[in-house]
Image: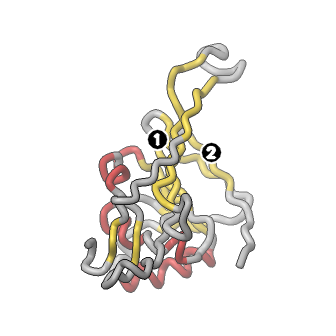
Amino acid sequence: LRNDSVWNNTRKEQKGICMARKQNGQNGQNGGQKTGSKVRVMMLGGLNEIGKNLAVIEYENDMIIIDCGLAFPDEDMLGVDLVIPDFTYLEKNASKIRGILITHGHEDHIGGLPYLLKELDVPVYGTRLTLGILESKLAEHRLLGERELLTVEAGTILKLGVFKCEFIRVNHS
């Protein structure tokens, strides 16, 4: 158990890793030659399940995290209140993390953030509404004001290490 009533779902370890070689374009440093570096896309939660959405994109010495949600326990998880992703890989690679991007404010996308932010001090980017929802969760965990929350608007393009990230509007129920 993690934090007394949170189960860290390591026994159902899910690895959805997609590898792709990055090739610089004509203007690139290597004149279009393959660099050998790989873009790694990892889903640390949210595959084949409802909830616990957490994606990581990594290239060389830079990583970004997209969402950090939670799931609610199955009926066979007696005494467990919440299920969060396994943060071990993120904790081991904390120096590479350039930021956490939040797509929207549903529990399956932000519910695990207070638990991750207790372990890591990295900036969190989201829209005003999404960060407003997140602020109440951080206050509940006594983290409000302890972590950097940065408001962005749709159309904003962030440069986080080697990544360029554009925020778009999301509507869903």
Indicate the quadrant where residue 24 lies.
top right
User: Residue 4 has which mark?
Assistant: none
Relative image position of residue 19 (x, y in whole percent): 55, 34
Q: Residue at x 47, y 74 (%)?
A: 71
Q: Residue at x 55, y 58 (%)?
A: 47
**Is 14 drawn above or below residue 26 in the view shown?**
below
Q: How crowded is mark 2: few (under 14 residues within 10 Å), some or many (20 or more)?
A: few
Tell me which numbered mark, 2 or 1, is placed earlier along the sequence: 1
Per the image, label 2 sits on a secondary structure element best described as strand
**Is 121 drawn above or below residue 28 in the view shown?**
below
Per the image, label 1 sits on a secondary structure element best described as strand
Relative image position of residue 60 (x, y in whole percent): 46, 33
**Would residue 64 appear left or right of 139 to someone viewing this image?**
right
User: Residue 164 has which mark?
Assistant: 2
Quarter holding the C terminus is: bottom right
Q: Considering depth in this image, is 154 or 3 the residue closer to the camera?
A: 3
Q: Considering depth in this image, is 97 or 144 the residue closer to the camera?
A: 97
Q: Dot 1 corresponds to which residue?
A: 62
Relative image position of residue 151 (x, y in whole percent): 59, 68
Quarter holding the N terminus is: bottom left
Q: Considering depth in this image, is 147 or 96 the residue closer to the camera?
A: 96
The amino acid marked with disc number 1 is Asp
**Could you tell me if residue 121 is visible in this image?**
no
